[in-house]
Amino acid sequence: MAGLALSVQDVATGKNLRGATIRGLDLSGLDLSGRHLEGVQAERTGLAGALLTGAHLEGARLIGADMRGAMLRSACLRGADLTDAQLDGADLTGADVRGVIGAPDTDHATGWDVLRSTTACP
């Protein structure tokens, strides 16, 4: 999937989306739990309320993504770029955020304050 530009339908049904381009898509509310999204190009993507529990987002480019209210429990965000991402109301409990670039304003994201040393990606 590396480098391919995908539609919402492609993302909704794909299990392995490593390196895919999903820039600007509205994936709000989709269940992407456990999906392989390593290195995905997701700048300005709508992920509000999305279920990303246990998702593999290592090295993902989530610049300016709307992730308000997203469920990111136990997700692997190691090395992801969250510059200007909106995380108000997101649940990052148990997520691995080591090496995250552009750590967002997380005053309203659950679990961010205890993540850096307590979890690891599988």
Image: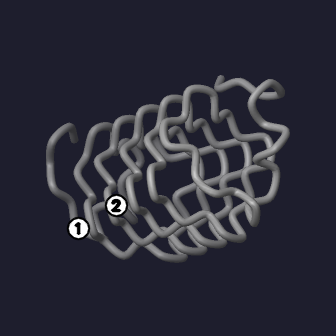
Q: Residue at x 80, y 58 (%)?
A: 110
Q: Is the residue 44 above or below the residue 28 in the image?
A: above
Q: Residue at x 43, y 63 (%)?
A: 65
| Rendering coords of residue 77 (x, y %) | 56, 38
Q: Is 80 displayed left or right of 22 in the figure?
A: right
Circle 2 — which element?
Answer: helix
- The residue nearer to you, when weighing 12 against 43, is 43
What is the three-letter code of the residue carrying label 2? Val
What is the three-letter code of the residue carrying label 1? Ser
Q: Is 64 displayed left or right of 73 in the figure?
A: left
| Rendering coords of residue 105 (x, y %) | 63, 57
Q: Is the residue 1 above or below the residue 78 in the image?
A: below
Q: Residue at x 35, y 36 (%)?
A: 39
| Rendering coords of residue 46 (x, y %) | 42, 72
What is the number of callouts on the image?
A: 2
Circle 1 — which element?
Answer: loop
Q: Is the residue 96 above or below the residue 109 in the image?
A: above
Per the model, the C-alpha gap separating discs 1 and 2 is 6 Å
User: Which residue is labeled 1 in the image?
Assistant: 7
Q: Residues within 10 Å of mark 2 (few under 14, many from 20)?
A: many
Q: Residue at x 34, y 65 (%)?
A: 44
Q: Quadrant of residue 22?
A: bottom left
Q: Quadrant of residue 113?
A: top right
Report the residue that reaches farthest toward the left. Answer: 4
Q: Is 21 displayed left or right of 117 in the figure?
A: left
| Rendering coords of residue 81 (x, y %) | 43, 42
Q: Are marks 1 and 2 in contact (CB under 8 Å)?
A: yes
Q: Residues within 10 Å of mark 1 (few under 14, many from 20)?
A: some
Query: Which quarter of the rendered picture does the C terminus lie within?
Result: top right
Residue 11 is tagged as 2
Residue 49 is tagged as none
Query: Which quarter of the rendered picture does the N terminus lie within?
Result: top left
